[in-house]
């Protein structure tokens, strides 16, 4: 029978190979876990953004409809309000531009 002890170099090489393999497996598992977490986060936030965009679109349509109905019911008042808002914005813009000089 051949019962030779493995050489120290072989033992060290085998131990290093085993350690590297275990480390690579652990890194792979963590990378997979991180990928799943990132995917779940992305999906959750994409759903929230999609819902928010839908809500914003619905609100914009409602405001547009209300504005159209108001202008139809009160045309003179609508023109006067629009002119006043335009004048106020113009005055504000001119004031800001004057201060920058």
Image (cartoon, rainbow, N blue to C red):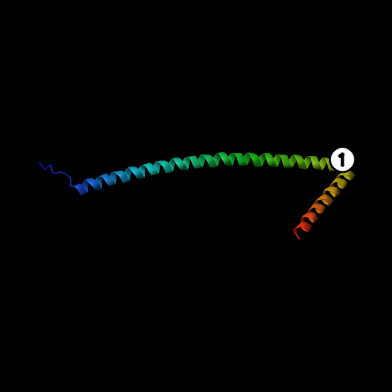
For the residue pair 12 and 66, the one nearer the viewer reads as: 12
Which residue: 65% across, 40% down? 52
Query: Where in the figure is residue 46, as x and y percent of width and height?
Result: 58, 42
Local crowd size for mark 1, using a 10 Å CA cut-off: few (<14), some (14–19), many (≥20)? few
Query: Where in the figure is residue 8, as x and y percent of width and height?
Result: 19, 47
* Residue topped by disc 1: 73
When asked about the image quadrant of residue 95, the answer is: bottom right
For the residue pair 73 and 78, the one nearer the viewer reads as: 78
Query: What is the total number of numbered labels drawn onto the structure image?
Result: 1
When asked about the image quadrant of residue 93, the answer is: bottom right
For the residue pair 45 and 73, the one nearer the viewer reads as: 45
Q: Relative to 99, is 75 on the left or the right?
A: right
Q: Relative to 2, is 73 on the left or the right?
A: right
Which residue: 46% across, 42% down? 34
Query: Where in the figure is residue 68, as x and y percent of width and height?
Result: 81, 42
Quadrant where the C terminus sits is: bottom right
**Residue at disc 1, secondary structure:** helix
Q: Relative to 85, is 6 on the left or the right?
A: left
Which residue: 24% across, 47% down? 12
Quadrant where the N terminus sits is: top left
Is residue 82 depicted above or below 101 in this figure?
Answer: above
For the residue pair 15 and 37, the one nearer the viewer reads as: 15
Taking the view exactly as shown, the residue that stands out farthest to the left is 1
Which residue: 51% across, 39% down? 40
């Amino acid at each position: 029978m051949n019962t030779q002890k493995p050489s120290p170099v072989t033992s060290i090489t085998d131990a290093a190979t085993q350690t590297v393999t275990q480390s690579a497996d652990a890194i792979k598992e963590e990378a997979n876990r991180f990928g799943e977490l990132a995917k779940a986060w992305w999906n959750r936030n994409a759903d929230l953004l999609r819902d928010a965009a839908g809500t914003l679109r619905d609100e914009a349509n409602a405001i547009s409809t209300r504005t159209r109905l108001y202008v139809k019911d009160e045309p003179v008042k609508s023109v006067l309000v629009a002119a006043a808002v335009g004048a106020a914005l113009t005055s504000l813009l001119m004031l800001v531009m004057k201060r920058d000089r």
